[in-house]
Amino acid sequence: MSHDEPLLAIDGLKTHFFTREGTVRAVDGVSLTVPRGKTVCVVGESGCGKSVTARSVLGLVDEPGRIIDGRIAWQPGAGEPVDLTTLDPKGERMRRIRGGEISMVFQEPMASLSPMYTIGDQLIETIRLHLPLGKEEARDRAVEQLRRVGIPRPEERLDAYSFQLSGGMCQRVMIAIALAADPALLIADEPTTALDVTTQARIIDLLRDLQAETGMSVLFITHDLGVVAEIADEVVVMYLGTVVERGGVDEIFHDPKHPYTNALLGSIPRMGAGAGRRLATIRGNVPHPSDRPAGCPFHPRCDAAIGGVCDVSDPPHIVFGEARSVRCVLHDDGAAVGGDFRVDGERA
Amino acid sequence: MTTMNHDISGASGVEAGADEETATPILDVRGLTVHFPIKKGFLSRTVGHVRAVDGIDLSVRAGETLGIVGESGCGKTTLGRSVARVIEPTAGQIVYRDTAGRNVDLAELNARRLRPYQRQIRVVFQDPFSSLNPRMTLRQIVGEPLRTSGTVTGSELDDRVASMLERVGLSPKYMNRYPHAFSGGERQRVNIARALVLGPRVVIADEPVSALDVSVRAQILNLLRDLQEELKLTYLFVSHDLSVVENICDRVAVMYLGKIVEVAGTADLYAQPRHPYTEALLSAVPRPDPRLRGAGRRIRLADDLPDPANPPPGCYFHTRCPYAVPGVCDVAERAPLLTSSGSGHRVAACVRSDELGLAGVGSEVGGP
Ligand SMILES: Nc1ncnc2c1ncn2[C@@H]1O[C@H](COP(=O)(O)OP(=O)(O)OP(=O)(O)O)[C@@H](O)[C@H]1O
Ligand SMILES: Nc1ncnc2c1ncn2[C@@H]1O[C@H](COP(=O)(O)OP(=O)(O)OP(=O)(O)O)[C@@H](O)[C@H]1O
Ligand code: SF4
Ligand SMILES: [Mg+2]
Ligand SMILES: [Mg+2]
């Protein structure tokens, strides 16, 4: 698989929820790519559409939601890419992709595992669903998988139930299940958010090691910029259902281009910076996606917003390079404004 | 949204550890213990006790922000709530210094005698979504403590509620709205208004920003700072987020399995931890700068926290401690006490504290 085409390319994805109260434009034109063997982090605040984007890839959008536009090109091998939006979510092909070629780990490890079945039952079932193995072979593979994710005494743990394990152990089991069929892409939706920092650090180490070992790609969803800085190769910043900026991890943290990215970085406390520092803030709140502002979705909170422009027309999508782009009029050379705008927070 | 914009940066960063001996505590907690019974079976027989708070000594100085940190289940919430006597302590003293300078042990007061003090020590609860009654308007929610304390009624009550809402950055014109109409950050402002409306001196804030989005979290932290300055408040700030704690606290107490293992001024604790557990916690925090990847000492603890109903002998941390010495750290008779060591005002409960030279957070702060 030495071709340059990205493993996953999402282009102009729109997933809306048609509720009685009105249409929720949860994902409203998301474009991003996941290169082979890389970790791409999707970061953004609650409700910005991170999970719905991920679930759209796997055909797992809940009622009353629907993908209404866009393409999701999936190209695991040398052949032509498949557009996942065209597959029947309940069809045979999608079922093979889901859990086989692409698998997912969720935020609540306890809730994702059934308390009715042992860890072994659940792991072996997934293995046999995707691989042509007999009972004994599947069991051996299950033990091997548990060992791989750092679970001590894996033979004994096969017979344990999820409620007998700590949150960190449950998340390891979930990762073992997700990796059972050697997926090309792992989607991890806030996999460490419910865990203690000490456990989080170990799960992040594990994911990083497993990726290096298998060469899989990871789409990692989080709202924690610290976690992004730890694990990402590339970063996708979302706000209100749109991608406002994409870039390499160093570019996002050290040369942010979008006012939202910039403000977000300014508003987080940085350990080691010392006590008593006032934080820069972003005024107001994130609006609900059913109540989306016209023009740039960020304009009511943006210090650099240009009256008559940002609140009226959709911001242009400025592309700097293959994985580097921003949606903001400030970077549009064709427009009347330009230059190197920066909101300086109180970063030391 | 806050109306005040005076800059107090630096003011609260003053080295708080220096005057350990001289500062008078507003709260002096001695041997505080909270045990929860573990019940089993049909007859609900008590089969053991979770030692959620296991003999804690802690002084809180007037006007400071004291952080309480530690992993989930270590007893932070139970400590905070028992100090406010929302939870009944099993044993111990909670000595509170009142406005007249008298010391009162809150732990031994009955409900009636406790009431005046409960106005002076208030709790802000964690979850801005479930902690507000959905059937009450903001006027009722914020006014309730005033009404039940019986001190204020009628239009004066409305005025007090309105000015309190204004102080936390909410317009009084929302007084008749219900909580569902507000965002997480706004609800947390309501929570804070409710806690402050009786004019307390001590506020116990239990994870007040943990459920909030990044951009809103900074607003609430700054609001808490402004209110502290303006109303001369003392905060007990419970949090599992070490970056937030560094930002807002003057001193920090680190908890492990119901005990405090280290207390120090924030700058000292972060730069030079003296307990291996503090070192491990600090090293696990992901830093928001990719250039710091792999920087600093990397310490990884096993996931398995011992059962708080059945803590290990000796130092409770020895089962996970990378520096534990068998035959020393795991011996019941040698359980380390929280004692001063090294420079005098630093306390840590570790027998090896002086010899280890633990690593803290460097000053390698990145950023564009
Ligand atoms: N089943 C549903 N019906 C209606 N709206 C929905 C549904 N699922 C999601 N939404 C809406 O879509 C928006 C995006 O949700 P999503 O779960 O993707 O956010 P997120 O970025 O993952 O947030 P979080 O960080 O809180 O997990 C939200 O405003 C949410 O309310
Ligand atoms: N009402 C209760 N009955 C029995 N056990 C309890 C009760 N409340 C807390 N505990 C137990 O006491 C211990 C300390 O709990 P506490 O909620 O104080 O921890 P915490 O440090 O606040 O954790 P978190 O970070 O998850 O909020 C835990 O083992 C918990 O299970
Ligand atoms: S498009 Fe306008 S409002 Fe939006 S972020 Fe850029 S400058 Fe601000
Ligand atoms: Mg989500
Ligand atoms: Mg708690």
Image (cartoon, coloured by chain):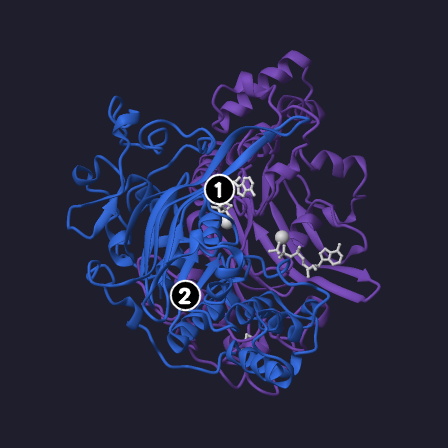
The chain identifier of the residue carrying mark 1 reads B
Tell me the quarter of the image containing the N terminus of chain A: top right
Q: For this rendering, which residue is in front, A257 or B12? A: B12
The CA distance from mark 1 to mark 2 is: 39 Å
Residue under the point 75% across and 36% down: A95
**Label 1 residue near ligand 2, CB within 8 Å:** yes
Q: How many marks?
A: 2
The chain letter corresponding to purple is A
Local SS, label 1? loop
Residue A115, quarter of the rendered image? top right
The numbered disc on residue B333 is none
Q: For this rendering, which residue is in front, B151 or B160? A: B151
**Label 2 residue near ligand 3, CB within 8 Å:** no
Which amino acid is tagged 1?
Gly
The chain letter corresponding to blue is B
Q: Which residue is mark 2?
A: A255
Q: Which residue is mark 1?
A: B73
Depth-wise, is mark 1 or mark 2 nearer the camera?
1
Is residue A78 among what the camera can see?
A: no
Residue B66, quarter of the rendered image? bottom left
Q: Is residue B22 above or below residue B196?
A: above
Is residue A31 among what the camera can see?
A: yes
Where residue A61 sits in the image (x, y, percent)? 75, 50
Residue B47, quarter of the rendered image? top right
- Whether the residues at callouts 1 and 2 have beta carbons within 8 Å, the answer is no
Q: Is residue B125 left or right of residue B201?
A: right
Q: Is residue B76 above or below residue A291?
A: above
Which amino acid is tagged 2?
Asp
